[in-house]
């Protein structure tokens, strides 16, 4: 241990300038692949589902289209800009300026001892939530091609096998899927374009009132189970629900911008990579999903039930049942590499934070957790999972942003032990982000991931000004100035 630094920090080597690559061959294409994942865009019109088995029905009458298409599209645009400017840009700039990954850069905000847990271990732990969501929905599409419903034995069996195989490949053979993953995002891109072309003619005829009425009428199912629980969202709440869904989905990927930024050549690469791969891709995927549902209703292609708002559930009505099955199969195939990458990130995190523990054990336990989420059906509650992820990483991104600005838009360097400013801001920020899970809460927290970010940012700033940061430890060999 040199100068009080643990070995994992002291031995960190920045990516040299000559090995950096352009934004369009790294950051943009990787992030675009994430935002084109069908699990993200299929539920943008839904906002929050009633339950996993009936996920095509929104918890709110009319879903996020209740106030019209324009309001919903505005919500997507605002959420996309928040993802880029608040959650991604500072980690991306820190990665570019230092050439170092998140688990090293994060030691400035959480300390060299605390950095093992935050953001390192937490990042790995949350990847298994991602794996569970991926396995649940990919298996649902695959089972659907054989006429098996969500929650059926076939669906759960496929989900279990999917999670186990993806975890194994991510742990031992990610190199075998990396090249294929470069081209697979083209599948959802093409499918989205086909859906847009097939429905664009009905956008002008979309009637949000009809969607609201259908959602309101969807009171109980055949078994008497409550389906539609709340009245339609107000204009503000449409934007807030879309923001919570999209930003919660993106939160960990935003913090991982540090790992992408360390491979970028300059600030222009960081900006363009995010604007194209995050903001533009989010607006493209989320916007087309909304347009397709609205257009399908306007053309009378939404089937007999206008309360169905999940985009993939409408493909059979928009196109044809056989084509829909083919597209579902292709979307599931395109989702396999992201499942492997989630496992790969988790494995790297655990190898760093728990170097003496066999990664087969740590990843095996994590995969068991993913399987449990699939079997329980909780993985089908994508909006709920994204809320937890946003609550966990919203304050991380907020605190890192405050730390960056306080250091003069540079990396301050690793701090000793547990940095109090970072940990206090995270605990309070997480409580704010997870507030809506309190059973008898006095009010509803609007857009929890953004609220968690703001609390993390403000609290870290105030605590740092109050002198509650631990001392900075010098990095050997000038790693802090790697990109200068």
Image: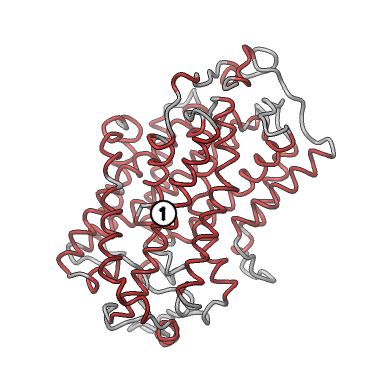
- Tell me the quarter of the picture where residue 222 sits: bottom left
Of 432 and 447, the residue lying toward us: 447
Relative image position of residue 162 (x, y in whole percent)? 28, 47
Q: Residues within 10 Å of mark 1 (few under 14, many from 20)?
A: many
Q: Is residue 74 above or below residue 233?
A: above
Secondary structure beneath label 1: helix
Classify residue 197 as left or right of residue 325: right
Of 219 and 398, the residue lying toward us: 398
Q: Which residue is mark 1?
A: 373
- Location of the N terminus by quadrant is top right
Classify residue 241 as left or right of residue 168: right
Residue, x 43% and y 64% (percent of image)?
44
Relative image position of residue 244 (x, y in whole percent)? 54, 60
- Tell me the quarter of the picture where residue 445 sits: bottom right
Of 424 and 299, the residue lying toward us: 299
Classify residue 323 as left or right of residue 119: left
Relative image position of residue 80 (x, y in whole percent)? 51, 55
């Amino acid at each position: 241990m040199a100068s009080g630094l643990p070995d994992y920090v002291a031995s960190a080597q920045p990516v040299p300038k000559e090995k950096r690559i352009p934004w369009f061959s790294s950051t943009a294409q990787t992030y675009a692949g994430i935002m084109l994942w069908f699990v993200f865009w299929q539920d943008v019109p839904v906002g929050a589902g009633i339950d996993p088995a009936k996920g095509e029905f929104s918890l709110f009458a009319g879903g996020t289209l209740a106030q019209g298409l324009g309001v919903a599209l505005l919500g997507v645009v605002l959420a996309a800009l928040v993802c880029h400017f608040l959650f991604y840009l500072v980690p991306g700039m820190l990665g570019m300026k230092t050439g170092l990954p998140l688990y090293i850069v994060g030691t400035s905000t959480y300390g060299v001892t605390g950095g093992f847990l935050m953001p390192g271990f937490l990042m790995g732990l949350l990847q298994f939530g991602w794996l569970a969501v991926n396995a649940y929905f990919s298996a649902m599409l695959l089972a659907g091609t054989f006429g098996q419903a969500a929650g059926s034995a076939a669906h759960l069996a496929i989900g279990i096998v999917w999670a186990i195989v993806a975890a194994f490949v991510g742990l031992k053979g990610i190199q075998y899927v990396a090249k294929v993953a470069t081209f697979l995002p083209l599948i959802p891109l093409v499918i989205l374009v086909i859906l847009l072309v097939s429905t664009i003619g009905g956008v002008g005829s979309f009637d949000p009132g009809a969607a609201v009425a259908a959602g309101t009428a969807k009171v109980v199912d055949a078994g008497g189970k409550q389906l539609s629980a709340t009245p339609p969202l107000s204009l503000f709440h449409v934007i807030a629900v879309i923001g919570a869904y999209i930003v919660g989905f993106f939160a960990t990927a935003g913090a991982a911008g540090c790992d992408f930024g360390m491979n970028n050549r300059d600030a222009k690469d960081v900006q363009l990579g995010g604007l194209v791969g995050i903001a533009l891709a989010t607006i493209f995927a989320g916007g087309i999903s909304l347009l397709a549902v609205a257009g399908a209703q306007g053309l009378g292609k939404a089937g007999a039930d206008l309360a169905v708002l999940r985009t993939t559930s409408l493909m059979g009505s928009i196109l044809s049942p056989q084509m829909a099955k083919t597209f579902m199969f292709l979307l599931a195939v395109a989702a396999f590499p992201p499942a492997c990458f989630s496992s790969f990130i988790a494995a790297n995190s655990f190898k760093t934070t728990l170097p003496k523990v066999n990664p087969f054990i740590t990843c095996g336990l994590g995969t068991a957790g993913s399987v449990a989420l699939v079997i329980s059906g909780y993985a089908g509650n994508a909006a709920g999972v994204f809320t937890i992820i946003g609550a966990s990483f919203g304050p991380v991104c907020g605190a890192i942003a405050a730390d960056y600005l306080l250091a003069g838009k540079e990396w301050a360097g690793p701090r000793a032990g547990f940095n109090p400013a970072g940990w206090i801001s995270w605990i309070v920020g997480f409580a704010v982000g997870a507030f809506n899970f309190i059973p008898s809460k006095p009010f509803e927290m609007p857009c929890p991931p953004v609220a968690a970010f703001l609390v993390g940012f403000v609290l870290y700033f105030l605590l740092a000004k109050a002198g509650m940061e631990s001392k900075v430890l010098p990095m050997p060999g000038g790693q802090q100035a790697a990109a200068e």
